[in-house]
Image (cartoon, rainbow, N blue to C red):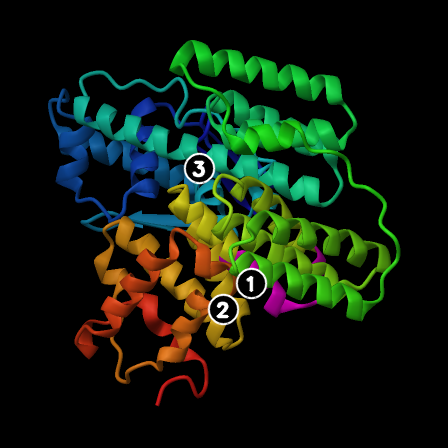
Amino acid sequence: MTLAIHLLGRPHVHRTGGDAYTFRSRKSWAVLAYLILSERPPTRSQLASLLFTDAGDPLRALRWSLSEIRRCLGEDGSLDGDPLVLHLAGDAMVDVEVVAHGSWLDAAGLPGLGADLLEGIAIRGAAAFDSWLLSKRRHLAAASEAILHEAALGSMSRGELDTARGYAVRAAAMSPLDENHQTLLIRLYRLAGEDDAAEQQYAAFSEVLDRDLGAIPGPAVEAATSQARDEREAFADAISIEAIVEAGSAAVSAGAIEAGIDSLRTAIRLADRADAVGLRINSRLVLAEALIHSLGGLDEEGLAILHEADRIALASDDPGAVAKARAELGYVDFLRARYDRAEFWLTDALKLAHGSPAIMAKATTYLGSVESDRANYARAVVPRRRRPAAGGLRALDAGPYQSSPWRPGLRNRAVRRLDQPRRTRPLAVISALAPGAAR
């Protein structure tokens, strides 16, 4: 990496093996941030009217800022044209892009993670820019919060409880009333054997909820507070563990959700003790789907289990299982309106699916829903030359999805797309991309 642009916190540029140019004008930082974060390249007149209306010659003032940005980029980027197009070298790093679209492993170590965009930068006489900046700050604060939560879950799945707790505390500080953060933090205290700290955290959160909202903690927080440490199970062979997983899944599908989930938790403990890698992954995937799709309010526990399944599948070189886990991770982020993170996980799932109709049906349905919620209808719709087989939708009718409160809406959305003219069918129904799925 040659050039690193940090816009979160106090903005600065770092250059490996040399000194980076220091901007002389705050407006140069504002221009650079706008160019990086805008959905489409702005024209020179738009930028001039946005930031330089108080100048005697707004376009000339803009040209001065553009020359500063070019000196900063050096050979690691270019900036030219009208509209203005910014190109950065392939190895250049921009922290806001990593937070919005990168892995938590890359984003968690950023020095400005959780800080405001362009902290300390104020532009006088630029009300329209101030409105844009406020919107982007809120968006990136939510993205940073999501990364911290994700980092806590990922670290917990690796057994790094102290590191995970640090991330969870930072996420909870950014949004003290978010029950998902509190649930995770209390679970981490329980897992570390710090029961007193877990009780204190629960009491403090209950007090804040009662004072600010007149509410009580939800079922996820209550479950985390009463969670007992894992009991040691007797040894079981692979056939017995598979039978327990199947029985648990069948119970969930039949509506006996709590009994089925208890069986699946037992299967995970047995698979871990037997060190049966395939069963360790599968039992976690089945339990996570049951928690997310069937038992309302416990998707936070499901997320933690999905991160465990993802880690084990990566270590055992099982891309299909990784794809399944990431499709579900994307689904939960979609439900929480964390659309950048949902897109990250779902795009990864499609890359790793290797043509599996079931995985692609889920991932494309969720991804189409993400783009629809963003009002990116052009991206949610792709041309289709052949009608996909209805079998792709069976993924939404199987296992724990049968009792999911979200399944009817998602399935109906996909079915409506199937009935649209072929030239306007959306991404949500490309389950037939797999060989043999469309005829």
> Closer to the camera, 25 or 192?
192
Q: Main secondary structure of the magenta part?
A: helix
Residue 299: % across, % down: 52, 43
Point out the tag, 3 or 2, that comes first from the N-terminus: 3
Residue 28: % across, % down: 32, 30
**Are circles 3 and 2 on residues that touch, CB within 8 Å?**
no
The span shown in magenta is 312-327
Q: Which residue is mark 2?
A: 359
**Residue drawn at (31%, 56%) of the image:** 409
Residue 317: % across, % down: 70, 67
Q: Nearer the viewer, mark 3 or mark 2?
A: 2
What is the three-letter code of the residue carrying label 2?
Ile
Residue 314 visible, this angle: no
Task: Decide: few, some or many residues near mark 1? Use Cα within 10 Å; few <14, some 14-19, many ≥20.
Answer: many
Task: Give the CA distance from mark 3 to mark 1.
Answer: 23 Å
The quadrant of the rendering that contains the C terminus is bottom left
Is residue 138 highlighted in magenta?
no
Point out the tag, 3 or 1, that comes first from the N-terminus: 3
- Secondary structure at badge 1 equals helix
Task: Give the CA distance from mark 3 to mark 2.
Answer: 26 Å
Label annotation for residue 143 = 3
Task: Decide: few, some or many residues near mark 2? Use Cα within 10 Å; few <14, some 14-19, many ≥20.
Answer: many
Side (left or right) of 361 relative to 197? left
To which quarter of the image does residue 235 belong? bottom right
**Residue drawn at (85%, 45%) of the image:** 232
Vertical order, 260 against 170 (above or below):
below
Side (left or right) of 243 relative to 406? right
**Residue drawn at (48%, 52%) of the image:** 293
Q: Which residue is mark 1?
A: 324
Task: Give the CA distance from mark 2 to mark 1.
Answer: 6 Å
